[in-house]
Amino acid sequence: MRRGQSAGGSLSAAAARLALEGGGPSIALQVLHYPPLDLVTATKDKHSPSGAKAVLKPWMGEVFDTAYIPDRARRTDRLASPAWGANADGIEGIAPALIVTAEYDRLRDEAWQYAQKLDAVGALAEYYEVPDVDHGYNIMSNNADVTRKVYEHIAGHVRRATAP
């Protein structure tokens, strides 16, 4: 299993792609929790229903993207931006994925796009959007009940994916 939140979700998607292309190891499930999956599109151009109140500000996205991959030209790589353009071509056989997004997150749309690409090849376990929350809701807010429910939901997927 590969699991990650935010940038960790992006790394998990990349690890699953590398496992697919390299013939292993076998991955039972990817859990991509509010992942950035398109580093090509500028954060300022990513929609948030919260507008200026969004947790992930455009300047923050640029800082994170630059720290992750300083060379903008390399952000087009299929491992860095699997939701961008045709980067999801050739993912038939990739490990199934649970994609968890936050309703107000700027990264929600790119996660939805990637979910559609996974679904097209039979690799989408579920797309699960957490209502009324933003990026980092589980670590930066008082949403303990929401967080608990989401983690229980994720745990259910993990149990099913790893059951003998």
Image (cartoon, rainbow, N blue to C red):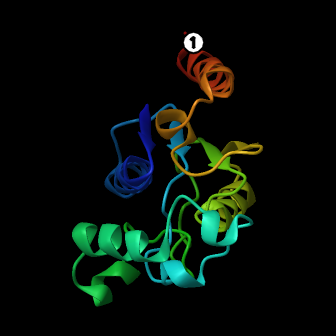
Q: Secondary structure at mark 1?
A: loop
Residue 144 in the image: state x and y as whole percent. Answer: 60, 22
Query: What is the three-letter code of the residue carrying label 1?
Result: Ala
Residue 128 in the image: state x and y as whole percent. Answer: 73, 42
Residue at position x 41%, y 35% in the image: 26
Residue at position x 60%, y 63% in the image: 54
Residue at position x 43%, y 31% in the image: 1
Q: Is residue 44 left or right of residue 13?
A: right
> Which corner quadrant holds the C terminus?
top right
Is the residue 70 above or below the residue 79 in the image?
A: below
Q: Quick check: can you spot residue 78?
A: no
Residue 21 in the image: state x and y as whole percent. Answer: 37, 58
Q: Is residue 118 left or right of residue 19?
A: right
From the viewer's side, name the closer residue of 2 and 65: 65
Q: Is residue 78 left or right of residue 158?
A: left
Residue 72 in the image: state x and y as whole percent. Answer: 30, 87
Is the residue 160 above or below the residue 114 in the image?
A: above
Is the residue 157 above or below the residue 47 in the image?
A: above
Residue at position x 60%, y 77% in the image: 46
